[in-house]
Image: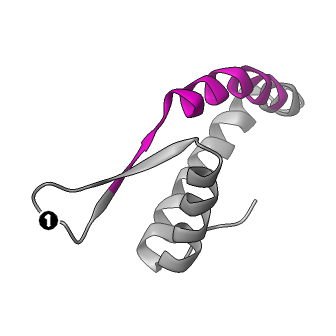
Amino acid sequence: KKILKSSGNITMVVDNLEDKGLVERRKDLDDRRYSMVHLTEKGRSTVEKILPGHVQAIQEMLCVLTESEQERLGRLCKKLGLSATEYS
């Protein structure tokens, strides 16, 4: 529900996911200052379990909008996302 802005926030989120066994960090082989975050098997199965219900809930919320309104909402969300990327 929050927009992640700082690397500290992202680190905290990844730490929590790692503590739950959902992701693992792997050092970048070319530049060891960086770590890549990968889903574990437990993380994959959690996503596969949760995603269908999440998608269904979104579809149910969007059904009150016409197709045209849904398309406009999609364009506006994309514009906001691009703006947030440029802002940070």
At x 71%, y 21%, the residue is 49
**Rendered position, 21 above or below 17:** above
Predominant SS of the magenta segment: helix
Q: Is residue 76 magenta?
A: no
Q: Mark 1 points at which residue?
A: 31
Quadrant where the image shows the N terminus: bottom right
Q: Is residue 44 magenta?
A: yes
Does any portion of residue 36 appear in the rendered image?
yes
Q: Where is residue 84 in the image (x, y as percent from the top left)?
A: 52, 70
Q: Is mark 1 on a helix, strand or loop?
A: loop
Please tell me in which quadrant of the rendered image residue 44 appears. top right
Q: Which residue is drawn at 64% across and 67% down?
A: 3
Image point (87%, 26%), residue name: 60
The answer to whether residue 50 is left or right of residue 18 is: right
> Which amino acid type corresponds to the residue marked 1 in the rendered image?
Asp
Of residues 13 and 55, the one drawn nearer to the viewer in this rendering: 13
Left or right placement of residue 10 versus residue 55 in this view: left
Residue 15 lies, with reference to residue 57, above or below; the image says: below
> Residue at the location (57% across, 46% down)?
75
Q: Give the range drawn in magenta.
A: 36-57
Q: Residue 27 at x, y = what percent?
A: 26, 57
Instruction: Measuring from the top left, give residue 71's x and y in whole percent.
Output: 63, 35
View extreme (left): residue = 30
| Category of crowding for the residue at label 1, using alpha-carbon neighbours closer than 10 angstroms: few (below 14), some (14–19), many (at least 20) | few
